[in-house]
Amino acid sequence: MAEIIQRDGTWAFYGDTLRLTPGRDKNVHLLRKTLGELTVPLAALAGVSLEQGKRSGRLRLRLRDGADPLLQATGGRLTDSLDPYQLTVESDRYGVAEYFVDEVRNALLLDQVPTDAVEDYLLPGPAVPLSVSAGDGTANFDGEHVRLEWNWKTEDAKAAAGSRTLALADIRSVEWHPAVGLENGYLRFTVKNAPTKAPPKYDPNAVELWGFKKDPLMTLIAAAVQARLPHPSTPPEDEPPKQLSQAGSDPDALLRRLRELGELHRSGVLTDEEFTLAKQAVLKRM
């Protein structure tokens, strides 16, 4: 087992899984504390890196596209302080962090974990029921229905329609955007037979967010709903599924794997030795 303990949190690696526990320090964001401990299977990882600074550095996990409903629903819009897959490391613990990175990278190589997108979520998303209040309303999700309730700050026309209940079967997508500068953020649901999108202030299927402390907690609702929607790789109902070739016998897939390894090597995720070993393993299968 490899483990690194910091004020920002504790990361432990057990060979086939990683356990990420947020710290109790006051600087740890409320979202990470609310998410709590996360268990990440090795198969969900595309890479790991350590960025060193003078006073502190940052461990980063890179997940495979489509592996986590939280990242899918937020679309890469989580800042460093919100991202549960980042850990602030004090400079005197760089040695431990480097050992942690080496252990995870070696496991990825030995298990030949691919870096391409996955076809099913490998993390479960937040548990339900959930209720979060922020911006102009409260979002509740019980696993089957989303209920949106408005507060005294809601725009009059939107509030006049009353509370909104959306069946999971009618929800086509969900997305969360943070407030940026003078632009407000939102949690929005795209529902069946409602293709147009009004501004969040007027949209009865959206909660408008103004950049306050609890806004990021709406990502919990987004992730829980996303985890129960069809995976993004799932073809539309009127489109037949594509026949997938086996990577072990498909020359094109092996060539793509070589290109991916080259990119990981150039970006510093793989050392020279790790790149050589991984490349040889792929070449033997061609």
Image: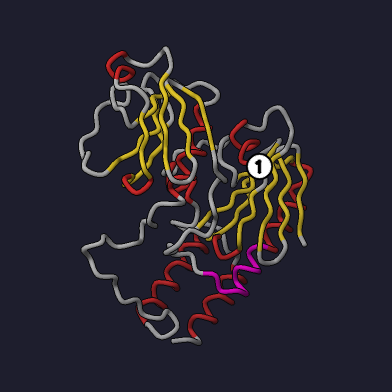
Observer-nearest residue: 69 or 281?
Answer: 69
Observer-nearest residue: 212 or 238?
Answer: 238
Magenta stretch, overall SS: helix
- According to the picture, the residue beneath numbered tag 1 turns out to be 36
Observer-nearest residue: 185 or 95?
Answer: 185
Residue drawn 48% across the image and 86% down it = 285
Residue drawn 29% across the image and 70% down it = 241
Tell me if residue 183 comes above or below residue 28 in the rendering. Answer: above
Residue drawn 43% across the image and 30% down it = 178
Residue 264 location, x and y as percent?
50, 62
Q: Amino acid at mark 1?
A: Gly
Find residue 277 and report its image quarter.
bottom right
Residue 284 location, x and y as percent?
50, 87
**Magenta-colored span:** 104-113
Query: Is residue 127 in the magenta section?
Result: no
Find residue 207 and report its image quarter.
top left
Observer-nearest residue: 225 or 258?
Answer: 225
Label 1, residues with CA under 10 Å away: few <14, some 14-19, many ≥20: some
